[in-house]
Image (spheres, coloured by chain):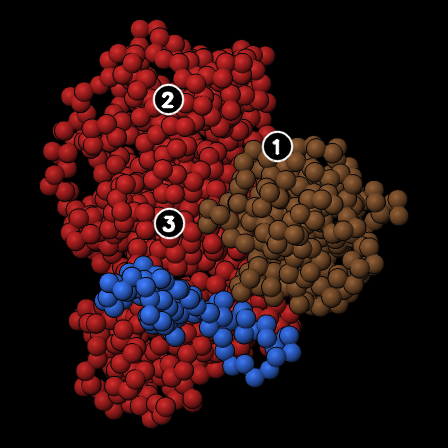
Amino acid sequence: MTTTELIDTVGHAESTPEQAQPYRELGLKDDEYQRIRDILGRRPTAAELAMYSVMWSEHCSYKSSKVHLRYFGESTTEEMRAKMLAGIGENAGVVDIGDGWAVTFKVESHNHPSYIEPYQGAATGVGGIVRDIMAMGARPVAVLDPLRFGPADAPDTRRVLHGVVAGVGGYGNCLGLPNIGGELVFDPSYAGNPLLNAACIGAMRVEDLHLAHASGTGNKVILFGARTGLDGIGGVSVLASDTFSGDESGSGRKKLPSVQVGDPFTEKVLIECCLELYREGIVVGIQDLGGAGLSCATSELASAGDGGMHVWLDRVPLRATGMSPAEVLSSESQERMMAVVTPANVDAFMRICAKWDVIATEIGEVTDGDRLVITWHDQVVVDVPPRTVAHEGPVYHRPIERPADQDALRANGPESLARPSTPDELRELVLRMVSSPNLASKRWVTEQYDRYVRGNSVLAQPADSGMIRIDERTGRGVAMSTDCNGRFCRLDPYTGAQLALAEAYRNVATTGATPLAVTNCMNFGSPEDPAVMWQFEQAVKGLADGCRELGIPVTGGNVSFYNQTGSTAILPTPVVGVLGVIDDVTRRIPTGIGAEAGDTLLLLGDTHEEFGGSEWAHVVHGHLGGLPPKVDLDRERLLAEVLVAGSRDGMISAAHDLSDGGLAQAVVESCLIGETGARVFLPEGSDPFVQLFSESAGRVLVAVPRSEELRFTEMCTARGLPWARIGVVDPEAGSLEIQDVATFGLDELREAWEGTLPALFD
Amino acid sequence: MSKIGVITFPGTLDDVDAARAVTYAGAEAVSLWHADADLRGVEAVVVPGGFSYGDYLRCGAIARFAPVMTEVVAAAAKGMPVLGICNGFQILCEAGLLPGVLIRNQGLHFVCRDQWLRVENASSAWTSRYEQGAEILVPLKSGEGCYVAEKSTVDELEGEGRVVFRYVGGNPNGSTNDIAGVSSANGRVVGLMPHPEHAIDALTGPSDDGLGLILSVLDSLVAA
Amino acid sequence: MARVVVDVMPKPEILDPQGQAVANALPRLGFSGIGSVRQGKHFELEVDDSVDDATLAKIAETFLANPVVEDWVVRRVES
């Protein structure tokens, strides 16, 4: 193939200013294209156009969300920043957890690819977030996967869920990372737009933190990992028609799918190789290649450094023949990393890569200019100021408008919905709720994930939060939970985001860990819809204000827009991840009761009649309306302090947070996970339906040994935390008795709870 | 202090866990690299779990050609105790140290669960610390853990007491005769699908039942 | 009855980690001269004579293969 004479060089671009370019097909607006021309003082080359178009896309540039996301930074106080070593803008946030350890964590979405090709979409979603964590200098130590699908009984849900679960497991298991948590939610709004959010936690010594920047003139830029192929360049393939005049490869390219295939084996080897490179101290800067591939890595590394960069693009090892410079720059081939290394260390770098059979190629050099120059067989195809590509993309103030139906939705409360009134009806409802897809045991999914590998998993699903030991000597560890109730967010995105934060915060504290920092994954519909932008703005404000009230910073996040089918957006779904620290994992609080016979069951917090957006309204009435539960973050903070104190002093033998499905769900799960019965008595004169199914926030069920009951309750009273004695653990019974309502055999409950997903998906 | 080797192939995952188990049992864990034809003076070898070479082609099919495996096969012929866990079991089968093969789970899914096993033979080099018939709880985590072999081979294994571990409380993967682990004729080489190295501490596993395998082999080394 | 063979292969431009692993192992085992390896799936179906080619194509396209990442070929091998 003779393509070199057709290459669109900078010189060629200068001499053909009027040549039409397919910028619209690449997603650029007229004014955006004009801005590129203004920046460069000429038309961009095909390769430059490929870079700008992908880096200025919503996904990479955050152009619709940027103005709102600033609020996270503005609302973070110095005090909140104290433990933060890296924050928003880096590959992932990093916090100091003590004993000289730093932990980095992040959640990212891979929603659309997981609908198109569920297995590979999910697999590469996991792979991508793991490389983000690696790029901070950390060893990835655990993953969590919040998943959302259409109705559990819809035929397409089966296809998507099977593929996504197999992809998360197939990649994560082969990579050797324990999967310690996540979510599984079914709702009709996700039918044509499932959500695959992937979270990863990494650990490193504080001094080993690596930030992505290319500094030091003369330092070498090394690309290492997998070869570069035609993965995920569907959009950019329109440029191929410029360089390949209708030959076989050219016309074939136009049909290229935007699908990437993951190779977890290569990624596992890449992890070990990177960690050895870090240990040897021979990496100046490091960057993962994710969305936008080399376009992103070269421009971000260069613009974060103190010089320019020259890249010899033809040196990139390729998997496919006849790739154009634009395609090489845009390829989203997985399992690649880019490092900046001093010339003296290049040999050592190459030796370590060779030991791990990792392909490594010196493709560039840090220069003393301020330009990113990319050549292709000695012809200049890119010559740009890197910041204009990576950081100075367009910023939009999208129109915002409260949805027209918001008031009607909130006025249509759940008060008039028919409720169970007799003990028999309540009994039936408990079983129906426990077996409903959102409340049923997630074991069918989590059993396909390795939760043991590396031997540091202290808690994993179905625990309230996953917990990983970081330091084997001291027992220091971290806990993490991700949460979001999209229905609450639909009713009130500000409060809904705070409820998501409160739940994740509470889940972390429920295992005995102290909440420390927050990440998020904002999944919303189209930013071009003012109603969606209102939801987004409200959710960001709610989350940021909530974090300030709780005194824990948002260290990073991810925005995923355009999650909609036709003009119908998904439920606003700001998934919130909270990371907590525990100085000694042996004092973790388990979820299941039964460690000691005769423990007292206490309900901490207040129960109000709150059914707007509840699981009960959804399951029984298919109803969504009214107001979500009230959120009281002072109360959440107090509750967390009491739980951590109780864990420290050995006063709590089990604890479980109350959320979806209310007290009934919490009690049933505590019994089934602990394989132990209990007797529960609801407060005298109370409405058993409200007690059992309301979803008031700020509540936790704890089991307290008899010997500690007085000390614990006195502590609650002294601190002003409401508590109620609602039952006892009864290992002899083999049943759960809810006094004056019903008695359930544990076998009967287990069948209801664990039978649902296998019946739907086996 | 006895030295027990733990092999790392590209794609090995549970090597740190196996080394930890060796250390917990009071021995020295020695890391062995797949590309080195050198057992570094160890007295026993653990081939740990994971996805060596991605488990592409067949589980263990590529790993068995590694230089270190040539040494392991030679040492095993002279009676060195060898334990293959999960992917390690698959590698030992591919290498011909153990009979049979592991195929895809009957349910087609990867299965990660706490699994009860019965110790069917407490006289192998890796099981002498257990009571005959003892039941132990260890994690199982594999997608290709269904043990199959020719009927004559299975009959021979059963007849000679070389089925070392059997699943109890339900067969998780369709394994022939509920077989979870088997041994060589001399009882020195043992392979099993479940992960005893993940059951050495109730903090991070379902029990500490798995430590007995390492303690057993240490006994056999001292006795030898 | 006819025997129908369906071969499903990863598309040429799609990464094939499995084939790549085999290709990388071959030189280590002393086999030289193998340029590349791609690994796919081979299905054999016993098919009633009443089943037409269009139906077979539909089976391959919508079920046996994922056309986003895989190509497929249907062959009738014996009648």
**Residue type of the residue flagged with mark 1:** Thr
Residue to which mark 2 is pinned: A663
Instruction: Compare marks 2 and 3 and give the one earlier in the sequence.
Output: 3
Give the SS element for disc 2: helix
Contact, mark 2 vs mark 3 (Cβ under 8 Å): no
Regarding residue A458, the answer to whether it shows in the image is no
Q: Colour of chain A?
A: red
Residue to which mark 1 is pinned: A586
Q: Callout 2: few (<14), some (14-19), or many (20+) C-alpha neighbours within 10 Å?
A: many
Give the SS element for disc 1: helix
**Chain letter for the part of the structure drawn in blue:** C
Residue to which mark 3 is pinned: A162
Query: Is residue A737 depicted above or below A103 in this figure?
Result: above
**Chain letter for the part of the structure drawn in brown:** B
Residue A250 lies, in percent from the top left, at: 29, 82
Instruction: Compare marks 3 and 1 and give the one earlier in the sequence.
Output: 3
The reply to the same-chain question for discs 1 and 2 is: yes
Say which residue appears at 35% left-offset and 62% top-offset.
C46
User: What subunit carries mark 3?
Assistant: A
The foreground one among A406 and A444 is A444
